[in-house]
Amino acid sequence: MHLETLIDDLGSFGIYQMILIPTLSLAVLVLGPTMLMMAFAGVEPDWWCTSQHLLPSQWNVSYANGSYQNCLWNGTCERKFSDEMETAVTEWNLVCQMSWVSNAIISIQMVGVLVGTVIAGYCADAYGRKKVFYSGLLLIFLGNTASAFSVSWVMFTVLRAVLGIACSFILSTTYLYQIEFVGKKWRALISSLPTWSVSIMMFSLLAKLLHNWKWLHLATAALTFPILFTWFFVPESLRWLAVKGRVEEARRVINKMAAYNKKPVPDTSILELIAEEEKAEGDKAKSYTYIDLLKTKKLARKTIFSCYIWFSCSIVYYAISFGLKNLSGDFYLNMLLMALTELPITPCIIVVTSLFGRRVCAAFAFLLTAAGCFGLAISTRLAPVEDKGNYINACALTAKCTTLLGWLVVQALCVEQYPTVIRNLGYAAMNSGARIGGILAGLVLSLGGSKDLMVPFIALGIVVCVTVLATLGLDETRGKALEDTMKTCTPETHEKGRLLLWEGQGGSTVPRDDQPDKLAEKVVS
């Protein structure tokens, strides 16, 4: 049982949704700078060793006097960093024997995202999308503000973990929150909104303008603060209210949607039916857990495939994002180009998915990602020296953009595999897989040492090839209604293993197909 007809009657994408969807998307604008802050804060600018024998004008003589990034020069080294940018590396001298700290901070942040994802998945289904969503926004505001005043890299690392948890609250709820207010025809549009790309563009421009990691944190906090006040206008998810039996609250949301969309208030009796159907599942309906994602073989297959797909997308996307400093050319320009090329790609999802379906489009995008990864690996060895940097950048750009394209498509494909009552748990499980991929992204980059990209990208290419098969193993969901309860997922609804029997005289039963009104159902093992 589902609410698709009711939402269509209210206007599947009317004025109300046109206001609500962009409002919720504002959170993603501050999510990008928060999530990828270490792409800037972890950069190691040029530096030189200084001594009493060297004048400031001689610091950049570099190789001539051996002072350029020499960790062992004269046994001791007081370092002078380039004033091109101020990062966490320059703040706490995270070079030489401390160079491991920067990558460790990234991994710890991703562990925070993983932990937060597990928490958010349970809480969003148990206590509502709205509370988790705005808790994440509040933590992003407080965490970014506090990070700017960090007094040590240890304090900064702890705050990055807290911000990781905050980011996971937004990542685990935003898309689901949005699609639960629109009709099935518009779910592809929601997944194709280029909010993330705009967020990365904003981050790259702020980094170019401010050049300072502290001001970047404060700017992100300042942008987050006004979004917090949308709490007073954004309602709880209509579908969540229905399955939780909060019928009167759901009716108030329906009345508001009808008023904004200038539609007559439809019959809301289905709200009671959905609440009763979910209640019939028993007390368990009030306390679904991650185990329910593996309740049947079909659900288990969907969960395993979906989690692997998200793991694969994450490990490729973040390996390239955090590895921008390893690419040739200007750091700010590379970051901006990555965002600009993503921007026109995402709207294409609407067209291609409507023509070919979600599975085929995602699988094709991942094939292109694999080609980009293998192409980059080959370029490191076979490309002409004078053009090697351009080849590597082009392949990295291709892999990152097609990964995002495929990820946005499977975002819709994967979450539509689950009913409302466990959809956020499923989404959280996928995000957990993605977070594991993010944690391992830095380790994969280190497979080839500090500079060699061949081995890491061969490994990434193999991972993505398996992703193509996993994507094709999911059910196509284009044009299908979203289920709201677990009734269709329980083994008892399967027709296999049933006999239809007619009760005869004396309590005996015999097969009778000609009297359906007297049929009794008996489950046989």
Image (cartoon, rainbow, N blue to C red):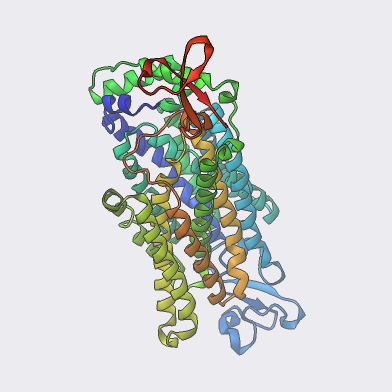
Farthest-out residue, right:
75
In front: 294, or 334?
294
In front: 85, or 268?
268
Q: Residue at x 66, y 77 (%)?
A: 49
Farthest-out residue, top:
506
Say if residue 321 shows up in the picture. no
Say if residue 296 shows up in the picture. yes
Height in image: 250 above or below 19?
A: above
Of the 4 image quadrants, the one containing the C terminus is top right
Of the 4 image quadrants, the one containing the N terminus is top left
In front: 459, or 447?
459
Q: Residue at x 36, y 58 (%)?
A: 342
Height in image: 147 above or below 62?
A: above
In front: 15, or 181?
181
Q: In this view, does 226 lie to the left or right of 491?
A: left
**Residue 14 x %, y %:** 26, 31
Q: Residue at x 34, y 16 (%)?
A: 268
- How many callouts does the rendering have? 0
Q: Is residue 367 left or right of residue 463?
A: left
**Quarter-wise, where is residue 12 in the image?**
top left
Q: In this view, does 292 lie to the left or right of 258?
A: right
Height in image: 487 above or below 174?
A: above
Farthest-out residue, bottom:
64
**Residue 186 x %, y %:** 30, 39
**Residue 367 x %, y %:** 41, 64
**Quarter-wise, where is residue 169 in the image?**
top right
**Residue 418 x %, y %:** 47, 37
Height in image: 452 above or below 511?
A: below
